[in-house]
Amino acid sequence: MKTIVIGLIVFLLCISVASANASETLDELPLISAENLEYKIVPANSTDGDVGIKTIYSTIKQGETNWHSVTISSYYTYITVDLNWGDTSDSLKLYIYDPSYNCLGSFYDSADGSIDGRIHLNIIDYDGIEKGTWRYRVYGYSVSGTEDYSI
């Protein structure tokens, strides 16, 4: 039953993706609950490998949304997401989407156990991370001026 429901959601998403242009599709991705998925999201250690998106540098202002993506084409049991802006007076929010457009959650600075201007997480699935394009949505939750960041 769970497989049928997930399949129906993916099908409906595909229909909406086909009828919208790319920027509308990305900005309007629904927050599909990932609680039934097999992923475990934990704070990353500084000694963990860096399997994930290549480092990209960008800027963001209050209320803005930036999208970033990485394609996973090999077998991995975890990927690392490291959003780093280093300024604790500003706050960014991170949404993580798997290749099936499931939102694995929204995360704030404290998601990795410390408030340090960084969200540093591992997404783990011991059966293997889903191959395809992973998307990261960075939102300027509380930003004064322009905030530089890397992901």
Image (cartoon, grey):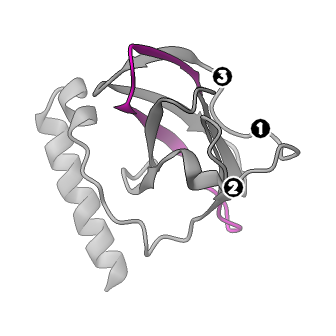
Quarter in which the C terminus is drawn = top right
Is-magenta flag for residue 144?
yes
Q: Which residue lies furthest to the bottom in this view?
A: 1
Left or right of residue 9, residue 96 in this image: right
Badge 2 density bin: few <14, some 14–19, many ≥20, Cα 10 Å: some
Which residue is at a point 64% across and 53% down the rendered structure image?
Answer: 112
Please give left or right for residue 51 compared with residue 125 in the image: right
Location of residue 136 in the rendering, given as x and y in whole percent from the top left corner: 46, 37
Whether tag 1 and tag 3 are in contact, CB under 8 A, the answer is no
- State the residue position of label 3: 55
Q: Which residue is drawn at 57% across and 54% down?
A: 111
Q: Residue 43 carries which label?
A: 2
Q: Does the magenta stretch include residue 130?
A: yes
Three-letter amino acid code of the residue under disc 2 = Pro
Residue 19 % position (x, y): 11, 36
**Percent x, y for residue 122?**
67, 52
User: Residue at position x 43%, y 75% from top?
Assistant: 36
The residue that mark 1 highlights is 50
First in sequence: mark 2 or mark 1? 2
State the SS at label 2.
Answer: strand
Q: Do the residues labelled 2 and 3 touch (CB within 8 Å)?
A: no
Q: What stretch is highlighted in magenta?
A: 124-151
| Of the pair 10 and 122, the residue shown nearer to us | 122
Res 56 → quadrant: top right
Viewer-side label of 2, 1:
2
Q: Is any atom of residue 136 visible in this view?
A: no
Query: Is disc 1 placed on a helix, strand or loop?
Result: loop
For the N terminus, the quadrant is bottom left
Q: Can residue 121 be seen in this view?
A: yes
